[in-house]
Amino acid sequence: MTKEEYQQKYTEEDAVGWDFISDHLDKLYGEQEPQHFGNSIPYSLGGQNPLDGLSVYNSTNQTDHFHIVSYGFSDLYYNEEAFDHDFSGYGFELTMRLKKQGDENIHWAMNLMNNLAKYVFDSAKWFEEFHFIPTNSPIRLDYDTDLVGIAFVIDPELGSIETPNGRVDFLQMVAITQKELDMLWENPKTAETAKLIEELRKDNPLLITDLDRK
């Protein structure tokens, strides 16, 4: 597609990047209608949440879990300046898979995603596969969990997509323990994070976060 074709096909009313993400999710989840949590006031205009939206799907793959997908790190809307860039916006959207723990509370995870978005937008530092970050507290404050950090990996089902605004990687947040976090700090190299992820993947191919994992 040329820039002229982009201008002819889309208008300023089109959510170009958003639609490509939604279409990609439709290929995985078919006609399932996700829970969607939008941001009524944009962050740039004083809104509380940086992300434009979060969609939550129910998955039965491997085990029953919630699959949360962000909208907001990539370039979601018509943008002639973004056309044909290598990466769309920051080049990724976040995902997280949460094992159903007997309640429907997923707001803590969505808050965590928005807090990570604040970090990215305020610092202009982005995440890539095998990066990791501490959460400086248990990832869910009202739950007795040993998980205190996040590692990032390409979502095993969503992978990456090419959009007219550039590539989007779906970076899945994988929750890790203090012991695992300390191990990564001792040798903070991509290869070490990759090794940890492969170890976790042996018993958990989709890398679903289980708050009860020790």
Image: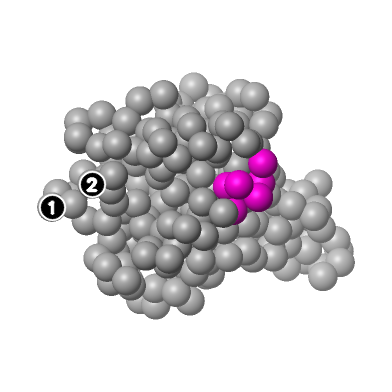
Tell me the element at label 1.
loop
On the picture, is 72 further left or further right than 144? right
Mark 1 Cα shell of 10 Å, populated few (<14), some (14-19), many (≥20): few
Residue 193 in view (yes/no): yes
| Residue under the image location 74 percent in, 52 percent down | 87
The location of residue 53, given as percent across then percent down, is 44, 46
Q: Is residue 38 magenta?
A: no
The quadrant of the picture occupied by the C terminus is top left
Which residue carries the number 1 mark?
102
Drawn side of residue 81 relative to residue 204, left or right: right
Residue 203 falls in which quadrant of the image? bottom left
Q: Which residues are magenta?
A: 189-194
In this rendering, is residue 205 above or below 123? Answer: below
- State whether residue 27 is above or below residue 143: below
Residue at left 73%, top 68%?
9
17, 198: nearer the viewer: 198
Give, as a three-letter code, the residue at label 1: Gly
Q: Is residue 35 visible?
A: no
Q: Of marks 1 and 2, which one's residue comes earlier in the chain?
A: 1
The residue lying at 65 percent from left, 50 percent from top is: 191
**For the residues marked 1 and 2, what is the alpha-carbon distance in whole angstroms?**
12 Å
Q: Where's residue 128, x and y in %? A: 64, 46
Question: As rendered, which of 34 and 135 lies closer to the eye?
Answer: 135
Mark 2, residue position: 212
